[in-house]
Image (cartoon, helix red, strand yellow):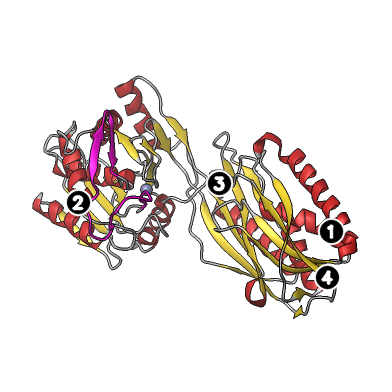
Amino acid sequence: MTDPFDLPEPRDLWRYFLALSRIPRPSGREEAAARWVAEEARALGCEVERDGVGNVLVRKPAAPGRADRPGVALQAHLDMVCEKNGGTVHDFDRDPIRVVRDGDAIRAVGTTLGADDGIGVAAAMAVLASRELRHGPLEALFTVDEETGLTGASALRPGWLRARYLLNLDSEEEGELTIGCAGGLDTVATRRLALSAPPPGARALRVEVTGLRGGHSGTDIGAGRGNSLRVLAQLLDAVLARLPVRLAALEGGAKRNAIPREASAVLLVSPADEPRLATLVAAEEAAGRAALGAFDPGLAIRLHPAAAEAVLSPEDARALVGLLLAAPTGIEAMSPDIPGLVQTSTNMGVASTRGGVAEVTFLTRSSVEPSRAALAARVAAVARLAGFEPRHDAGYPGWKPEPGASLVGLVDGVHRATFGRPMVVKAIHAGLECGLIGEKHPGLEMVSLGPTVLDAHTPDERVGVASVAAFARLLGAVLEAA
Ligand SMILES: [Zn+2]
């Protein structure tokens, strides 16, 4: 491990990356980084514009003789995910990231590196600084707050970019070309609960569903994993139909954008019914394990002593369990364009009965806008049938893959000519800034590319020197060919 290390090739890119790493840039607090980008670009003789939320747009004229070429915009986000190891002392609002070289890998000491998307920012800066590249009219768009809400891209002014092509520099697998993403829409369904005192003589027991793998509600939704809320609902449906138990509370899932791994419910049971409850729990655990198999082998359902101060009415309990049982969750449709890509899905992510209100949250995704709206409407319809009131947020748009678009052929052709092999063309079932940028620039062709970044969003984040060099070589060749 060397610190500081000699700059690898391409030296301009790494010089910009190290300079950027000295500037704190957590999501929502990118002002210093935005100012740095703007000042560097002005010093290079480029035209710089800022918008109200802090995005920076840089324009650089074409190289001599290239003014008639189609305009290309490079795009990267300025913010970074701030995660550190337990023992690391680091203030992300003040301290520079300590970047070190470890063989081929560049990483940080105890913190995220910010290669996501600092390498994209540095690559764009190196292109702005280059006097050798024979590119056409060039723009570089640096956005704020990608990681926590895509708010920089959402606030973009329609038509701000003049380019015909946009290269998003935020992908994390060298040799892959991303050409589509999913839009998202949150739905929160609520129902006010009628609570009453627990029946006398009943014992409170907590039934807990644990051991599921969970995962990202978009990219892992097709992996066949169990949803703890659905597993719990199946059990409660059987219990409420067979035993005179009362539901006192229900809780499950941590984030709307994660497949829920755990869920629990507090039941009030007469001591005489406890053995039958235990039998139903064991049967549901066996059924769940048989259904999930190797997709999610760790499922466990257990009963523990608990306490309860109030119980839901039987109607409220049936409504909540019915919604959790009947609402769509998981894959709705696969893509006809990209083999293996989930096109439309929803994730029943969080449920609770806190504060006298039952609340269930869904995140619906699709790369096809009308399909997303249709599935979200179905989620809302099931919620209404269960006596809940569903509310949708504004959502963000997807980016429909067009494998035959001319920019896809251009970048793939340059990759073949440069490295002797085609790119892996793919789309992701999660949000990217391209969805929002495309919505504001109809007709703009976009692709996303980048070097291989490993363990992004964790303190193990690292990027390979060789991979960055290959990425920079591809980027330069694409700009000369466009
Ligand atoms: Zn990123």
Q: Nearer the viewer, mark 4 or mark 1?
A: 4
Which is closer to the viewer, label 1 or label 3?
1
Q: Return the mark for residue 26.
A: none
Classify residue 48 by image quadrant. Answer: bottom left
Q: Which residue is mark 2?
A: 22
Q: Residues within 10 Å of mark 1 (few under 14, many from 20)?
A: some
CB at mark 4 closer than 8 A to ligand 1?
no
Which structural element holds mark 2?
loop
Q: Is residue 455 left or right of residue 62?
A: right
Q: Is residue 3 within the magenta segment? A: no
- Between the residue at mark 2 and the residue at mark 1, the CA separation in whole angstroms equals 58 Å
Residue that label 1 marks = 239
Residue placed at 66% from the left, 48% from the top? Answer: 332
Mark earlier in primary sequence (1, 3): 3
Q: Which residue is mark 3?
A: 215
The nearer-to-camera label among 3 and 4 is 4
Q: Position of residue 46 (x, y in %)?
A: 14, 52
* Secondary structure that dominates the magenta span: loop
Question: How far is disc 1 from disc 3 in space, using C-alphas?
Answer: 28 Å
Q: What's the magenta region?
A: 83-109
Disc number at residue 202? 4
Q: Is residue 329 left or right of residue 153?
A: right
Amino acid type, mark 2: Arg
Q: Are marks 3 and 4 in contact (CB under 8 Å)?
A: no
Could you tell whether 402 is left or right of 391 in the image?
A: left
Q: Disc 4 or disc 2, which is closer to the eye? A: 4
Between the C-alphas of marks 4 and 2, the distance is 61 Å
Q: Are marks 4 and 2 in contact (CB under 8 Å)?
A: no
**Residue, x 70% and y 55% (percent of image)?**
208
Residue type, label 4: Ala
